[in-house]
Image: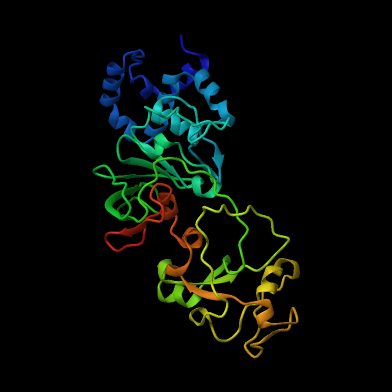
């Protein structure tokens, strides 16, 4: 006999069992046939609600509750936020593999590999949270059995797929199709040409460590060249970037770079290729800008002296303007994450730093 709340839900949603209150079917083949018979109902108005109810009833309400609360999960399955109803990873898991265990990360709460998706990864998942929060997605989801991925853009889900297995070799090219079914970015089907510059990631990456920058290394990217942004809109690989070089700072803590680690490129402060005439940015004043709340440049009529810190230009240092192609990989990655379209850093969690072009010449799709 159905639970009281279950029965009430079934009364309000007859599509769950068929309009004539057909009994539940325990055999997978029989259940599949019943769903196929009513596929138009699931695709019609309100059908998505029926699909969620069906998934919950199939698993069992108490079982779903129990699974949702494991590994720091939470209820409800469809939380309300930003004046919208959002799909939780627990609901996504329920629809993808039949259980409401919502951990899609590469590790369990104890830090061991998350293998619960192994064998349940006919389709995969890529998530923006991997870039935002540094939590890699489970290997099985990043490498599904078929080349189909749900893309989690933060508060929205879209889907991307290939007609054949995607190559993993660096420099390989392939066509990726992307579907966004909801406004404002959709409905839209886009064909994306992917150049996997560094190939594909197959396993979760380890968190990067912070090494104290040495004098001459780039310590910070200040901004992209405003003129380049105007001349080449959206083409951040063609822009120059204002950067600050590191200087000796005894107060800054960081691990020593291992001897066998590749050294960071170093730049010369007076390299003529990276200079810019006119007003200039003082390195020392920029470093303490949040204490002084002074973000202004040194005026052009004072080319050799900073009045704010009372030091010569050579003593305090100044910013350089370096083309994207000459930036170290770590700084290129930062620029890309800042200026890329939303879909790019999401796809980079699978194909790092890939070049992504919309085949028809339109802007890249939203996700």
**Image coords of residue 354 (percent x, y):** 37, 56
Q: Considering depth in this image, is 65 or 241 the residue closer to the camera? A: 241
Quadrant assignment, res 32: top left
Q: How is the image coloured?
A: rainbow
> Image point 51% across, 65% down: which residue?
265
Q: Nearer the viewer, residue 217 or 204?
A: 217
Note whether residue 345 is visible.
yes
Residue found at the very far front of the displayed protein: 259
- Image point (43%, 58%), residue name: 341
Q: Position of residue 311 (x, y in %)?
A: 73, 81
The one of 199 and 26 positioned closer to us in this rendering? 199
- Please say if 277 is above or below 153: below
Outermost residue on the left side: it is 163
Residue 68, percent across and down? 54, 27
Image-quadrant location for residue 17: top left
Nearest the eye: 156 or 176: 176
Question: Viewed as shown, does residue 355 lie left or right of 78?
Answer: left
Q: Is residue 38 above or below residue 314?
A: above
Give residue 226's position: percent from left, percent from top: 50, 75
Please indicate whether residue 109 sits to the left or right of residue 326 in the image.
right
- Furthest toward the bottom, the residue is 301
Up-down: is 343 above or below 115?
below
């Amino acid at each position: 006999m159905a639970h009281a709340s279950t029965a009430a839900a079934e009364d309000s949603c007859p599509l769950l069992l068929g309009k004539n209150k057909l009994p539940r079917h325990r055999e997978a083949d029989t259940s599949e046939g019943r769903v196929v018979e009513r596929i138009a109902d699931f695709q019609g108005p309100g059908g998505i609600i029926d699909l969620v109810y069906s998934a919950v009833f199939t698993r069992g309400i108490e079982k779903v509750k129990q699974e949702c609360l494991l590994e720091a999960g939470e209820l409800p399955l469809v939380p309300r936020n930003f004046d919208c109803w959002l799909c939780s990873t627990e609901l996504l898991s329920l629809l993808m593999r039949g259980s409401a265990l919502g951990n899609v990360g590469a590790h369990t709460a104890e830090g061991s590999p998350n293998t619960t998706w192994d064998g349940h990864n006919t389709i995969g998942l890529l998530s923006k949270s991997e870039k935002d929060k540094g939590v890699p997605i489970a290997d099985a989801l990043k490498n599904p059995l078929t080349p189909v991925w749900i893309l989690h853009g933060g508060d929205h889900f879209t889907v991307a797929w290939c007609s054949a297995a995607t190559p993993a070799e660096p420099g390989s090219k392939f066509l990726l199709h992307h579907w966004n079914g909801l406004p404002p970015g959709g409905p839209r089907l886009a064909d994306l040409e992917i150049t996997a510059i560094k190939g594909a990631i197959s396993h979760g990456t380890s968190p990067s460590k912070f090494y104290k920058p040495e004098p001459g290394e780039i310590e910070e990217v200040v901004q992209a060249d405003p003129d380049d942004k105007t001349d080449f809109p959206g083409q951040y690989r063609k822009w120059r970037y204002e950067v600050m070089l590191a200087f000796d700072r005894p107060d800054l803590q960081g691990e020593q770079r291992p001897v066998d680690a590749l050294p960071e490129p170093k730049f010369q402060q007076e390299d003529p290729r990276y200079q810019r005439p006119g007003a200039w940015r003082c390195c020392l004043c920029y470093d303490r800008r949040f204490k002084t709340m002074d973000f202004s440049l040194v005026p052009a009529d004072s080319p050799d002296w900073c009045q704010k810190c009372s030091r010569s230009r050579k003593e305090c240092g100044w910013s350089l303007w370096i083309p994207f192609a000459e930036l170290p990989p770590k700084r290129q990655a930062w620029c890309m994450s800042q200026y890329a379209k939303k879909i790019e850093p999401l796809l980079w969690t699978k194909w790092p730093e890939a070049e992504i072009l919309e085949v028809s010449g339109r802007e890249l799709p939203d996700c």
